[in-house]
Amino acid sequence: MAKEVDGFIKLQVRGGQANPAPPVGPALGAKGVNIMEFCKRFNAKTQESQGKIVPVVITVFKDKSFEFIIKTTPAAVQLLEAAKLKKGSPESNRQKVGNVTWDQVKAIAEDKMEDLNAFKIESAMKMVAGTARSMGLNVKGTPPWGAEAAEA
């Protein structure tokens, strides 16, 4: 028989560095989850992405047990890494703060593909490019699917 779900908790935690301090402790404590058990299991699973921000979705059951799914690093964080910036533009429509290439956008889209609701890599690339533009980054070069499609 399947366990009855009590709720979901969505957090963004640095890989391998979960601890009972906020935001993890208060979010899990409110649902009655064993905080140290989560921290140990999360840190063990995210050793390879040490220090990077990792989204996690925690499913809490009625008996206070839990499961969690680790997602890929957010596109915005990957774009900042690719552009070698600390943060995006405060006015993305007026002030551009950096550049990324279509090759970098493709690499990020391929990494994020499992978490995006896109079936083709071109669709995923358009999503990532849109995130880049909303952060004040220019996407340099010609899109792989052709310039006429990018303007549409």
Image (cartoon, rainbow, N blue to C red):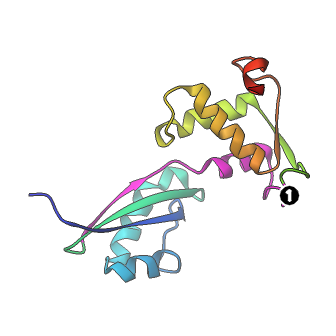
Q: Helix or strand or loop: what does disc 1 sit on?
A: loop
- What residue do we see at 77% from left, 51% from top? 135
Q: Nearer the viewer, residue 4 or 100?
A: 4
Q: Is residue 67 left or right of residue 145?
A: left
Q: Position of residue 144 (x, y in %)?
A: 71, 19
Is 107 situated above or below 116?
above
Q: Residue at x 72, y 21 (%)?
A: 149
Q: Residue at x 53, y 79 (%)?
A: 22
State the extent of the magenta-drawn residues as a range: 65-91
How many labels were placed on the picture?
A: 1
| Quadrant of the frame with the N terminus | bottom left
Q: Is residue 81 above or below residue 33?
A: above
Residue 31, horizontal then vertical, whole percent: 34, 78
Instruction: Return the residue nearer the eye: 108 or 84.
Output: 108
Horizontal arrangement in the rendering, residue 36 relative to residue 107 (left or right) = left
| Label 1 Cα neighbours within 10 Å, binned few <14 / some 14-19 / many ≥20 | few
> In terms of image quadrants, where is residue 140?
top right
Most extreme residue toward the front is 152
Q: Is residue 86 part of the magenta span, yes or no?
A: yes
The stretch drawn in magenta includes residue 140: no
x and y percent of residue 76 in the render? 67, 50
Name the one closer to the observer, 142 or 51: 142
In this figure, which residue is indicated by the disc labeled 1? 91
Which quadrant holds the C terminus? top right
Residue type of the residue flagged with mark 1? Glu
Residue 54 rendering spot, x and y as whole percentages: 53, 56
Going 85% across and 50% down the picture, which residue do you hit?
93
